[in-house]
Every structure is written in structure tokens, then in C-alpha cells.
Image (tube, rainbow, N blue to C red):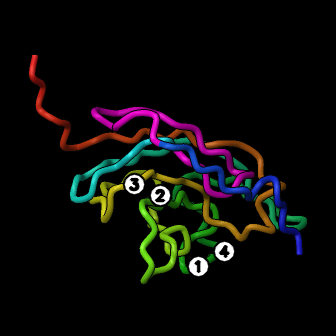
């Protein structure tokens, strides 16, 4: 009930660029998983910083929210509205998609990539409840171990 097919359609964007230094992306709070188009490399560390204010709507209540989420309501063990991430790589026949078990990112977190793959982002909220949200997040993704320059 309430599932918005158009808003929750996962659009895979093949990596358009390796993440050498840092870049920015926008995460729309009404949408489900959003591909950044950035390929992360297994074992490397990446810092993900988010900023922005948005509104998470639940029935008649509207809550101002930021990348850390709101701790008055939880979904999947994390604050509702919190920024989540997952790295989607080559399919592994023995496991469930990483999108089913996302990482809590919040406002500022450094992660170590568990696999080569594309970084996906979304806010923490059930699929049937995102379509009435308002606003967006600005996210900076930084490679903490850039490749050595040869020039």
C-alpha cells in the first residue's frame, strides 16, 4: 500500500568516472535508491558528507529532518530520514543484494568499500512513505586514498 513505482524504480547508472579525488551529488528525498555513477574500489576508504534540510511527512505530521534523521521514529533500526548507502557490484550468487542491507551514513562518515561497485544513496524511510517528502540533500564523496599522480 502506498508504493510509488516511479519514485522507487532503481536506475542503474554505469560508472561514468572513477572517484579520484572528490565530487558532489544530490539525493532527492522522494526517490528510492539513486545511483551516483561513481565506482568505489574494494579496500579503499571514502568519506561521505551530507548537508541539507528536508521534510519527512508521515500522515498528518511533518518533521524537519537532516542527514542524521529524526530519532523520534525509526525504520530498519536506524533513524527515519537518515542518509543510507550501498555499494552495488557484480552479483554474488550466495548473497542478497547490498541494497537490502544498507550502511548508515548520516551527516559525516568514512567507510571502507567492501567490494568494487557503484555507490547508491537514499534516505531511510519505507518505500510507501517517501512520495510526499520535500527537499534534497547535497552529498560530497571523497576518496581518502587518491591514486598517486604521475605528472
Percent x, y of residue 129? 79, 66
Among numbered discs 1 and 2, the one appearing first in the sequence: 1
Q: Quadrant of the C terminus?
A: top left
Viewer-nearest of labels 1 and 2? Answer: 1
> Picture coordinates of residue 33 (x, y %)?
62, 56
Q: Which residue is mark 2?
A: 106
Q: Is residue 135 magenta?
A: no
| Part of the protein shown in magenta | 15-36
Position of 59 with respect to 93 (left or right) is right
Vertical comparison of 113 with 73: above or below: above
Residue at image position (42%, 73%) is: 92
Disc 1 element: loop
Residue 29 position, x and y percent, is 69, 50
On residue 73, which mark appears? 4
**Which numbered disc, 3 or 2, marks the residue closer to the eye?**
3
Q: Which residue is mark 3?
A: 117
Q: Toward which corner of the image does residue 103 lie, by quadrant?
A: bottom left
Residue at x 33% of width, y 56% of height:
116
Q: CA distance from mark 3 to mark 1?
A: 23 Å
- First along the sequence among labels 3 and 2: 2
- Mark 3 secondary-structure assignment: strand
Amino acid at each position: 500500500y502506498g508504493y510509488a513505482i516511479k519514485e522507487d524504480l532503481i536506475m542503474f547508472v554505469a560508472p561514468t568516472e572513477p572517484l579520484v579525488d572528490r565530487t558532489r551529488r544530490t539525493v532527492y528525498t522522494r526517490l528510492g535508491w539513486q545511483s551516483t555513477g561513481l565506482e568505489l574500489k574494494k579496500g579503499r576508504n571514502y568519506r561521505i558528507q551530507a548537508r541539507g534540510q528536508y521534510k519527512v511527512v508521515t500522515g498528518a505530521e511533518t518533521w524537519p529532518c537532516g542527514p542524521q534523521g529524526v530519532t523520534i521514529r525509526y525504520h530498519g533500526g536506524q533513524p527515519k530520514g537518515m542518509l543510507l548507502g550501498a555499494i552495488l557490484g557484480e552479483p554474488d550468487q550466495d548473497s542478497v543484494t547490498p541494497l537490502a542491507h544498507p550502511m548508515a551514513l548520516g551527516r559525516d562518515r568514512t567507510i571502507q568499500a567492501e567490494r568494487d561497485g557503484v555507490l547508491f544513496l537514499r534516505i531511510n524511510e519505507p518505500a510507501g512513505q517517501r512520495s510526499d517528502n520535500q527537499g534534497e540533500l547535497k552529498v560530497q564523496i571523497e576518496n581518502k586514498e587518491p591514486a598517486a599522480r604521475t605528472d
